[in-house]
Image (cartoon, rainbow, N blue to C red):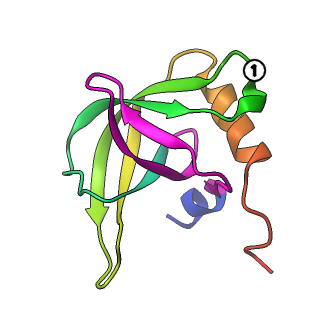
Protein backbone atom coordinates (compact mmCIF):
# COMPACT_ATOMS: atom_id res chain seq x y z
CA UNK A 1 0.00 0.00 0.00
CA UNK A 2 2.79 2.46 0.85
CA UNK A 3 4.58 1.98 -2.49
CA UNK A 4 1.31 2.67 -4.31
CA UNK A 5 0.98 6.00 -2.53
CA UNK A 6 4.56 6.95 -3.36
CA UNK A 7 3.84 6.79 -7.09
CA UNK A 8 0.70 8.93 -6.86
CA UNK A 9 0.93 12.56 -7.96
CA UNK A 10 -1.50 15.25 -6.91
CA UNK A 11 -2.25 17.45 -9.89
CA UNK A 12 -1.96 21.24 -9.53
CA UNK A 13 -4.67 22.05 -12.09
CA UNK A 14 -8.42 21.64 -12.06
CA UNK A 15 -8.73 19.20 -14.93
CA UNK A 16 -12.36 18.32 -15.64
CA UNK A 17 -13.48 14.71 -15.97
CA UNK A 18 -16.59 13.50 -17.82
CA UNK A 19 -18.43 10.25 -18.38
CA UNK A 20 -17.67 9.79 -22.08
CA UNK A 21 -20.86 7.84 -22.80
CA UNK A 22 -23.28 10.46 -21.40
CA UNK A 23 -20.96 13.52 -21.51
CA UNK A 24 -21.98 14.14 -17.88
CA UNK A 25 -19.50 16.19 -15.85
CA UNK A 26 -18.25 13.96 -13.02
CA UNK A 27 -15.75 16.15 -11.20
CA UNK A 28 -12.13 17.23 -11.08
CA UNK A 29 -8.97 15.15 -11.19
CA UNK A 30 -7.18 15.18 -7.82
CA UNK A 31 -4.41 12.67 -8.41
CA UNK A 32 -3.39 10.08 -10.96
CA UNK A 33 -1.09 7.11 -11.50
CA UNK A 34 -0.77 4.72 -14.45
CA UNK A 35 -3.09 2.39 -12.49
CA UNK A 36 -5.86 4.75 -11.42
CA UNK A 37 -7.07 8.18 -10.38
CA UNK A 38 -9.00 10.03 -7.69
CA UNK A 39 -11.75 12.52 -8.52
CA UNK A 40 -13.37 15.21 -6.45
CA UNK A 41 -17.09 15.70 -7.12
CA UNK A 42 -20.27 17.13 -5.65
CA UNK A 43 -22.25 13.92 -6.23
CA UNK A 44 -21.28 10.47 -4.94
CA UNK A 45 -20.19 7.85 -7.47
CA UNK A 46 -21.14 4.35 -6.39
CA UNK A 47 -18.36 1.75 -6.14
CA UNK A 48 -18.14 -1.04 -8.73
CA UNK A 49 -19.34 1.16 -11.60
CA UNK A 50 -17.53 0.79 -14.93
CA UNK A 51 -17.31 3.83 -17.18
CA UNK A 52 -15.22 5.51 -19.82
CA UNK A 53 -13.66 8.56 -18.22
CA UNK A 54 -12.78 11.51 -20.44
CA UNK A 55 -10.10 13.74 -18.91
CA UNK A 56 -9.67 17.23 -20.36
CA UNK A 57 -5.94 17.85 -20.74
CA UNK A 58 -4.09 21.18 -20.39
CA UNK A 59 -3.58 23.45 -23.41
CA UNK A 60 0.11 22.61 -23.69
CA UNK A 61 -0.66 18.99 -24.55
CA UNK A 62 -1.15 20.24 -28.11
CA UNK A 63 -3.70 18.37 -30.21
CA UNK A 64 -4.15 15.70 -27.52
CA UNK A 65 -6.65 17.69 -25.49
CA UNK A 66 -8.36 14.68 -23.95
CA UNK A 67 -7.51 11.30 -22.50
CA UNK A 68 -10.13 8.54 -22.47
CA UNK A 69 -9.68 5.59 -20.13
CA UNK A 70 -11.92 2.70 -19.18
CA UNK A 71 -12.15 2.62 -15.40
CA UNK A 72 -14.07 1.16 -12.49
CA UNK A 73 -14.95 3.07 -9.35
CA UNK A 74 -13.46 1.37 -6.31
CA UNK A 75 -14.53 3.58 -3.40
CA UNK A 76 -16.33 6.83 -2.63
CA UNK A 77 -16.05 8.81 0.58
CA UNK A 78 -17.07 12.18 1.93
CA UNK A 79 -15.55 13.51 5.11
CA UNK A 80 -17.92 14.87 7.72
CA UNK A 81 -18.77 18.53 6.97
CA UNK A 82 -16.96 18.33 3.61
CA UNK A 83 -18.49 19.77 0.46
CA UNK A 84 -17.05 17.21 -1.92
CA UNK A 85 -16.92 13.47 -2.40
CA UNK A 86 -13.66 11.77 -3.33
CA UNK A 87 -13.87 8.71 -5.56
CA UNK A 88 -11.08 6.28 -6.38
CA UNK A 89 -10.98 4.70 -9.83
CA UNK A 90 -8.92 1.80 -11.11
CA UNK A 91 -8.14 1.84 -14.83
CA UNK A 92 -9.32 -1.39 -16.44
CA UNK A 93 -7.89 -0.80 -19.90
CA UNK A 94 -5.11 1.57 -20.94
CA UNK A 95 -4.84 2.20 -24.70
CA UNK A 96 -1.40 2.53 -26.26
CA UNK A 97 -0.02 6.02 -25.72
CA UNK A 98 -2.27 6.69 -22.74
CA UNK A 99 0.32 5.63 -20.16
CA UNK A 100 2.76 8.15 -21.64
CA UNK A 101 0.13 10.90 -21.32
CA UNK A 102 -0.51 9.91 -17.69
CA UNK A 103 3.21 10.03 -16.88
CA UNK A 104 3.47 13.42 -18.59
CA UNK A 105 0.55 14.71 -16.48
CA UNK A 106 2.19 13.35 -13.33
CA UNK A 107 5.52 14.98 -14.12
CA UNK A 108 4.39 18.32 -15.54
CA UNK A 109 1.51 19.09 -13.20
CA UNK A 110 2.46 17.61 -9.87
CA UNK A 111 1.76 19.80 -6.90
CA UNK A 112 5.14 20.88 -5.56
CA UNK A 113 6.11 21.34 -1.94
CA UNK A 114 3.82 18.86 -0.21
CA UNK A 115 6.63 16.88 1.36
CA UNK A 116 8.37 19.91 2.92
Q: Is residue 48 left or right of residue 7?
A: left
* Percent coordinates x, y for residue 77 in the rendering: 29, 67
Q: Secondary structure at mark 1?
A: loop
Residue at x 72%, y 31% (from the top left corner)? 59
Q: Is residue 83 on the magenta stretch?
A: no
Residue at x 20%, y 44% (from the top left corner)? 48
Observer-nearest of 54 and 32: 54
Q: Is residue 34 left or right of residue 59?
A: left
Residue at x 62%, y 28% (from the top left corner)? 99
Residue at x 80%, y 81% (from the top left corner)? 116
Numbered range of the magenta stretch: 7-35
* Percent coordinates x, y for residue 52 in the rendering: 35, 27
* Percent coordinates x, y for residue 28 in the rendering: 47, 50
- In this rendering, the count of numbered labels is 1
* Residue 98 against residue 10 in the figure, above or below: above
* Percent coordinates x, y for residue 95 in the rendering: 51, 17
Residue topped by disc 1 = 62
Amino acid sequence: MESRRAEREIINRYLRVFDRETDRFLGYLVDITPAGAMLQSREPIQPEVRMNLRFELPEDFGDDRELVLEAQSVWDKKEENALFHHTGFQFTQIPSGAEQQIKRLMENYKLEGLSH
